[in-house]
Image (cartoon, rainbow, N blue to C red):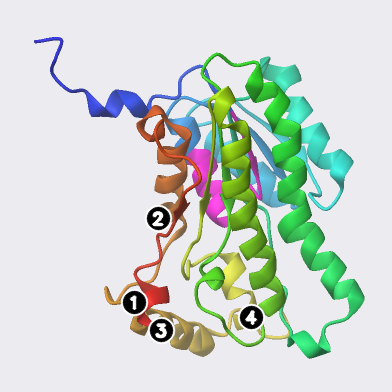
Amino acid sequence: MSTNTPAPLRAYDLTGRVAVVTGAASGIGRRSSEFLAAAGARVVLGDVDADGLRETSERVNVHGRSVAEITDVTDRAAVEALIRRATEEYGRLDVLCNVAGAMSPGMIEEITDQQLEDALALNLRSVVWGCRAAIPAMKRNERGGSIINVSSGAIDAPVAGIGLYALAKAAVAMLTKTLAVEVGPYKIRVNALAPGATLTKFTTWRLQRADGTLDREAYDAFVERMKERSPLGEIGEAEDQAHLVLHLASDAARWTTGAILRANGGQTFAW
């Protein structure tokens, strides 16, 4: 075979690389961890949900080796410890996925100072802390590294009642672009996802009854409503975002930085 024959899938080989994923206990974080491990990366998993984290670790270990660390990303020291765990365990850090986050519902005029503080700590400050801790480790790599932040489709289509969440995610998008400029000279790429409606615990929390069981009628109505907002007539799943995470983590995206990628079924321009 000619040496000039393209071998595009080789660019997705992450063998020998180390990735940290926050919010790894479920949803996009879990599926992204699986994809990264399947591509050959060793993955360090962080989340506050011990049971979910254990299950993710078991899934990831089917493909390779992982380390799980209970991590409250609203605690700066905990975020720094997670990054340090990766470098101590594996000697390097190549990929950071800042996935952890949660909805912060409420009308702007009604939110309390504590709600504001909590939302910014979880959805914005944690991302800053993760990036800040990862950069020194990535600077030591000859090939740099890749930071992947999770923003939201909420930055494109304002919706009453989630403004606090949206403003934090908009800040994540600008953080991503600014950081891409600052660390580009070290071959560190910084990109973000702005997911559309994706079927995970994150999007279905509001569809549960008081006893914690799923309200099937409300769930079905939600799914149909989200499908109607997409020209494709579909709703996203965690793996739709995980595919983008894998792409951005790999050499296939070596010329991509400062980008906000939108796997959202066209929802935001259809509103």
Q: Residues within 10 Å of mark 4 (few under 14, many from 20)?
A: some
Image quadrant assignment for residue 10: top left
Q: Secondary structure at mark 1?
A: loop
Write the start and end of the magenta stretch as one range.
19-34
Horizontal relation, residue 81 to residue 205: left or right: right
Between the residue at mark 3 and the residue at mark 2, the CA separation in whole angstroms equals 21 Å
Q: First in sequence: mark 4 or mark 3?
A: 4
Front-lying residue, 17 or 133: 133
User: Which image quarter is the C terminus in?
Assistant: bottom left
Nearest to viewer (mark 4 / mark 3): 3
Q: Is residue 28 magenta?
A: yes
Q: Are marks 1 and 3 in contact (CB under 8 Å)?
A: no
Cα–Cα gap, marks 4 and 2: 22 Å
What is the residue that sits farthest to the left in this orientation?
1
Report if residue 90 lies within the magenta region.
no
- Residue 253 in picture, x, y percent from top left: 39, 35
Q: Are marks 2 and 1 in contact (CB under 8 Å)?
A: no
Q: Amino acid at mark 1?
A: Ser
Q: Give the Cα distance between marks 4 and 3.
A: 21 Å
What count of labels does the image hold? Answer: 4
Side (left or right) of 105 relative to 18: right
Label 2 neighbourhood size at 10 Å, few (<14), some (14-19), many (20+)?
Answer: some
Can you tell which mark lies on residue 206?
4
- Write down the residue under mark 1: 230
Residue 171 seen by the camera: yes
Q: Which residue is mark 2?
A: 240
Please say whether residue 50 is visible from this viewpoint.
no
